[in-house]
Image (spheres, rainbow, N blue to C red):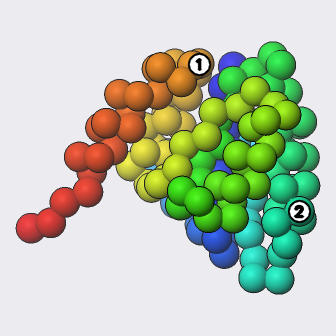
């Protein structure tokens, strides 16, 4: 089974999860979680909150994907450090189209390789008219 953790600066991860719920229905908190990063949080505090969700989602038995807002930001860095201890996949640059695609069919994405077409599709979701 695939479990999802969203982490971002401010309350972006909670806001994206809320928006997904508006479009695709509420997500099961046993399968999807948002971890926010606030200005007063240290990297260690954020890392502890993400690790709590990783442990809860049991990466030994489930494919755990962590979605981050920015590469090299604190949520990404905390997740990267945890990836040295736990078997997780990290995806950065999360956006609403990406999350909808993944969450609507998350159990299809059980490996890093299966996520690549979604990443490519999401590149096309950015544009200008």
Which class describes the residues within 10 Å of circle 2: few (<14), some (14-19), or many (20+)? few
Circle count = 2
- Helix, strand or loop for disc 1: loop
Seen from the viewer's position, the closer of residues 81 and 49 is 81
Q: Quadrant of the C terminus?
A: bottom left
Q: Nearer the viewer, mark 2 or mark 1?
A: 2
Left/right of residue 65 with respect to residue 22 in the rendered view: right
Q: Quadrant of the N terminus?
A: top right
Q: Which residue is drawn at the image coordinates 79% and 35% (left, top)?
A: 84
Name the mark on residue 44: 2
The answer to whether residue 30 is seen in the rendering is no
Q: Is residue 117 above or below residue 21?
A: above
Residue picked out by circle 1: 110
Q: Is residue 14 above or below residue 104?
A: below
Name the mark on residue 57: none
Q: Which residue is drawn at the image coordinates 47% and 20% (left, top)?
A: 113
Query: Which label's residue is closer to the chain start, 2 or 1?
Result: 2
Q: Which residue is drawn at the image coordinates 75% and 77% (left, top)?
A: 38
Report the Cα–Cα distance between label 2 and label 1.
28 Å
Quarter location, residue 11: bottom right
Q: Is residue 3 above or below residue 124?
A: above
Residue 41 appears at what percent x and percent y? 83, 75
Seen from the viewer's position, the closer of residues 123 and 43 is 43
Residue 82 appears at what percent x and percent y? 80, 43
Q: Which residue is drawn at the image coordinates 53% and 37% (left, top)?
A: 103
Seen from the viewer's position, the closer of residues 1 and 128 is 128
Left/right of residue 72 with respect to residue 125 in the rendered view: right
Left/right of residue 56 with respect to residue 97 in the rendered view: right
- Helix, strand or loop for disc 2: helix
């Amino acid at each position: 089974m695939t479990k999802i953790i969203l982490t971002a600066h401010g309350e972006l991860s909670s806001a994206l999860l809320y928006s997904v719920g508006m479009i695709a229905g509420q997500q099961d908190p046993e399968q999807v979680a948002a971890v926010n990063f606030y200005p007063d949080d240290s990297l260690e505090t954020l890392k502890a909150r993400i690790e709590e969700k990783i442990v809860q989602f049991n990466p030994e038995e489930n494919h755990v994907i962590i979605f981050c807002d920015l590469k090299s930001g604190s949520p990404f860095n905390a997740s990267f450090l945890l990836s040295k201890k736990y078997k997780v996949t990290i995806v950065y640059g999360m956006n609403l189209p990406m999350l909808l695609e993944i969450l609507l069919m998350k159990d299809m994405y059980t490996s890093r390789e299966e996520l690549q077409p979604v990443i490519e599709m999401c590149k096309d979701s950015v544009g200008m008219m």
